[in-house]
């Protein structure tokens, strides 16, 4: 897949390694990704690694169809922000994608929607595709306020910067109750929320079809991937645990590929 085709890939499957791996394991996993997944026609594969392994990802993946990214970035350009990593630093390692607002960060590091919105803009300004995570807790779903929650997460960005900023961006619906639990959203639950997100972004964008991609994340595995990826407005998946196994990740990517067309 050439760089231009990446933008038009119909499905995206994105690995979120979270805080897993070491130099040796990563090498084996990335090499296996390349041997199994290079050359997919309709699916863009991306792997978001911990910061220290960006150089390793770059050296093993450049020249292949697989792109790499990070799991966070700083909202500031540079300065006295100990422990932070800027967008420009990510660009130095060929990073094309960044996960933002993952619930594991939002909860543990008290990231506000406004903070995440600022990072979203910084990523765009540096030509890095933001992968914005949105989703509700189990309590919010049981209370029936899941659309309110996700709506607010999107509105924070729309109100600050306009809906256009979602063009060529990625939103990942990740119900918090489905992350790492083995209990994925049902196709019906996912369908309803993906329609809500799609309609909201399309309406906010003056009813023009937005070129945003909307992924589903939360306990995707090779068994449920095909059914989920066949749902309207699901453009692929953001994968945690199963991205750590080349075989399972390949199964998910092949499901994405066969869900197209
Ligand atoms: P799991 O696939 O392990 O449920 O994780 C999903 C996730 O958090 C992706 O960002």
Image (tube, rainbow, N blue to C red):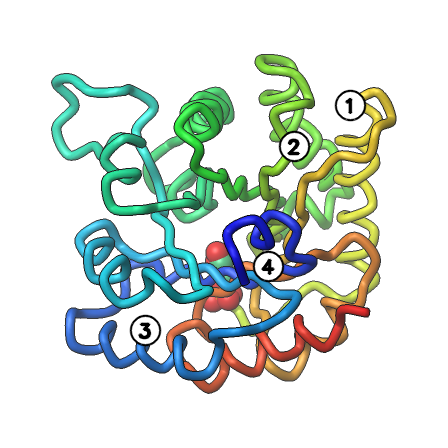
Q: CA distance from mark 2 to mark 1?
A: 9 Å
Q: Earlier in the sequence, mark 3 or mark 1?
A: 3
| Tag 4–tag 1 contact (CB < 8 Å) | no
Answer with left or right where residue 80 lies relative to residue 69: left
Answer with left or right where residue 202 lies relative to residue 184: right
Q: CA distance from mark 4 to mark 1?
A: 22 Å
Tell me, yes or no, if residue 179 can be seen here.
no
Report helix, strand or loop for mark 4: strand
Circle 4 Cα neighbour tier, 10 Å, few/some/many (<14 / 14–19 / ≥20): many
| Tag 2–tag 4 contact (CB < 8 Å) | no
Circle 2 Cα neighbour tier, 10 Å, few/some/many (<14 / 14–19 / ≥20): some
The residue lying toward the viewer, choosing from 219 and 58, is 58
From the top left corner, tell me how far across and down residue 71 is, in percent. 36, 47
Answer with left or right where residue 44 lies relative to residue 201: left
Q: What residue is pinned by disc 1?
A: 205
| Tag 2–tag 1 contact (CB < 8 Å) | yes
The residue lying toward the viewer, choosing from 252 and 129, is 129
Q: What residue is pinned by disc 2?
A: 167
Asked which quadrant contains residue 105, the reply is top left
From the top left corner, tell me how far across and down residue 23 is, in percent. 15, 70
Q: What residue is pinned by disc 3?
A: 30
Q: CA distance from mark 3 to mark 4?
A: 17 Å
């Amino acid at each position: 897949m050439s760089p231009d085709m990446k933008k038009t890939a119909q499905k995206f499957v994105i690995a979120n390694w979270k805080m897993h791996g070491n130099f040796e394991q990563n090498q084996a996993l990335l090499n296996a990704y390349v041997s199994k997944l290079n050359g997919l026609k309709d699916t863009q594969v991306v792997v978001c690694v911990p910061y220290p392994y960006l150089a390793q990802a770059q050296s093993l993946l450049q020249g292949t169809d697989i792109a790499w990214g990070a799991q966070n970035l700083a909202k500031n350009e540079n300065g006295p922000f100990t422990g932070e990593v800027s967008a420009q630093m990510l660009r130095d390692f060929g990073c094309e994608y960044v996960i933002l607002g993952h619930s594991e960060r939002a909860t543990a590091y008290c990231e506000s929607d406004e903070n995440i919105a600022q990072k979203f803009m910084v990523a765009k300004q540096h030509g890095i595709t933001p992968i914005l995570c949105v989703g509700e807790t189990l309590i919010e779903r049981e209370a029936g306020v899941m659309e309110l929650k996700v709506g607010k997460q999107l509105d924070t960005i729309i109100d600050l910067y306009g809906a256009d900023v979602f063009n060529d961006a990625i939103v990942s619906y990740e119900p918090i109750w489905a992350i790492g639990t083995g209990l994925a959203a049902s196709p019906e639950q996912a369908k309803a929320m993906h329609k809500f997100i799609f309609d909201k972004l399309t309406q906010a964008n003056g009813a023009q079809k937005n070129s945003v991609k909307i992924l589903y994340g939360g306990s995707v595995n090779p068994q449920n991937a095909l059914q989920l990826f066949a749902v309207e407005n699901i453009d692929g998946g953001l994968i945690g645990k199963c991205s750590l196994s080349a075989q399972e990740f390949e199964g998910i990517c092949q499901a994405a590929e066969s869900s197209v067309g």
